[in-house]
Image (cartoon, rainbow, N blue to C red):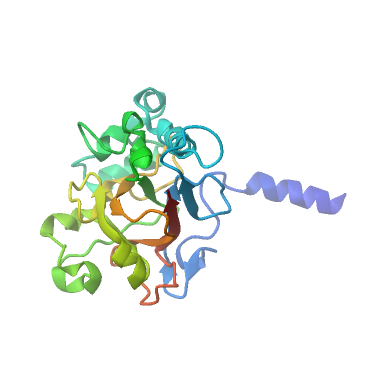
Amino acid sequence: VIFSAFVIVYILLLDKKTPRRLGNESALAFDNGINPGLGFRPQYYMDRSLIQWRTSRKTGHQSFIQMVDNVHQWVLGYGLKDQYHQQMIDCAGLPRDVLINYFRQGLSCIFFFTDVKPGPNPCSKPKNYGYNKGRPCVVIKLNRVFGWVPEPYQSKDEVPLEIRDLWQPVMKDYVLIKCFGQYPTDQDLIHQIDHISILGNKAIGGIPLYYYPFLNQPGYRQPYIWAQFIKVESNVLLNIICRAYARNIRQSTSIEDMTGAVHFELWFQ
């Protein structure tokens, strides 16, 4: 009885909004602090990283429609109607101190699926998200970490070699995301990947800094980018790695290390 009473008191004292341990004390922290990871969609089976479908099959097992529906159900959470019922504001151009004050009040930056690419978008339901044409669109999202604020690169010299030639001064206001073939054989079979994001640069995606920090706001929506695989070989298992880039996202030189990254496979026929 005494133990149960202690448990009840402990639960009542817990802050429902703010984690008890933050920053380097968080369970998510590495030796050098918090390091957010990435996620992807579609993920038809949540315990698997394989995206597999047949472009010719509209129904049944491995139908491309299964992939389309899986992506679309996730994207629907970013619809206009859904977000109008939440406490959303347009954050573009607002100073960070103003943003943090809004976030503490429970407000979130608005993020429509149309924000990723205004106008015609190849990654859309009418286009079957490219799956019927063998040009799959994959959502790449930065995982939520309470209180984490990205530190963008301020000069080209700071940028990792693998994306240094792509860096431009406008990218000081973004967390950068880029997808690659994971191994040399994959890179030979993946001829073109378009990154579709608010940044507007097909060679690399970007998420604006004004979406951070996440403070557990009720209506918060994770910003995301699209990676569309324009020219890839069919009937071959392709290993993909997508990485997030900022000064405070630790990068590993090992292709097996998923720190600040996500891995998945593509296979279609």
Query: Relative to the observer, which residue lies in front, 149 or 101?
Result: 149
> Is any atom of residue 160 visible in this view?
no
Residue farthest along the left direction in this orientation: 169
The residue located at (45%, 38%) in the rendering is 64
Image height check: is 155 above or below 39? below
From the viewer's perspective, tell me whether residue 178 is left or right of residue 73.
left
Query: Relative to the observer, which residue lies in front, 239 or 87?
Result: 239
In percent of width and height, residue 74 lies at: 45, 37
Residue 163 lies in quadrant: bottom left
The residue located at (49%, 38%) in the rendering is 63
In percent of width and height, residue 234 lies at: 38, 53
In percent of width and height, residue 233 lies at: 34, 56
Query: Relative to the observer, which residue lies in front, 149 or 14?
Result: 149
Query: Relative to the observer, which residue lies in front, 153 or 203?
Result: 203
Image height check: is 45 above or below 66? below
The residue located at (57%, 44%) in the rendering is 16
The residue located at (33%, 72%) in the rendering is 184
Q: How many marks?
A: 0
> Is any atom of residue 27 visible in this view?
yes
Residue 183 lies in quadrant: bottom left
In percent of width and height, residue 30 lies at: 47, 71
Image height check: is 104 above or below 143? above
